[in-house]
Amino acid sequence: MERYEAWIDRAKSSLEMASTRISSLVYYEDLCYQAQQAVEKGIKGST
């Protein structure tokens, strides 16, 4: 697997976690963090 493909896979994983159905046990800050991580990893994978 190419290096960029690994970053894109990790970005998809973070985005999936950020898209998780919100329950009373999940903090919005944690969802925002996962969304931010998805973007950062996507950028790393595209450069």
Image: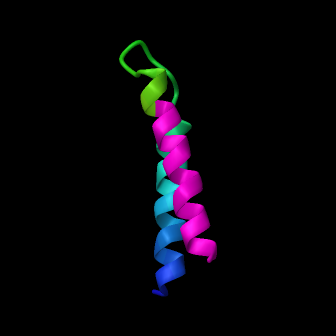
Is residue 15 depicted above or below 11 in this figure?
Answer: above
Q: Quadrant of residue 44?
A: bottom right
Q: Residue at x 56, y 72 (%)?
A: 45
| Residue 33 placement (x, y as % from top left) | 47, 38
Instruction: Report the residue that reaches farthest toward the left.
Output: 25
User: Magenta segment: does it hold 40?
Assistant: yes
Task: Name the quadrant containing residue 43.
Answer: bottom right
- Note whether 36 is above or below 40 in the view shown: above
Nearer to me, 33 or 2: 33
Q: What residue do we see at 62% from left, 77% from top?
A: 47
| 43 shown above or below 30 | below
The one nearer the camera, 29 or 11, is: 29
**Residue 41 magenta-drawn?**
yes
- Residue pushed farthest bottom? 2
- Magenta stretch, main secondary structure class: helix
Here the colouring is rainbow
Give the image location of residue 6, x and y in percent.
Answer: 46, 74
In the rendered structure, which segment of residues is drawn in magenta?
A: 31-47
Image quarter (top left, top right, bottom left or bottom right) of the N terminus = bottom left
Residue shown at the point (49%, 50%) measured from the top left: 37
* Residue 32 position in % (x across, y down): 52, 33
Count of labels shown? 0
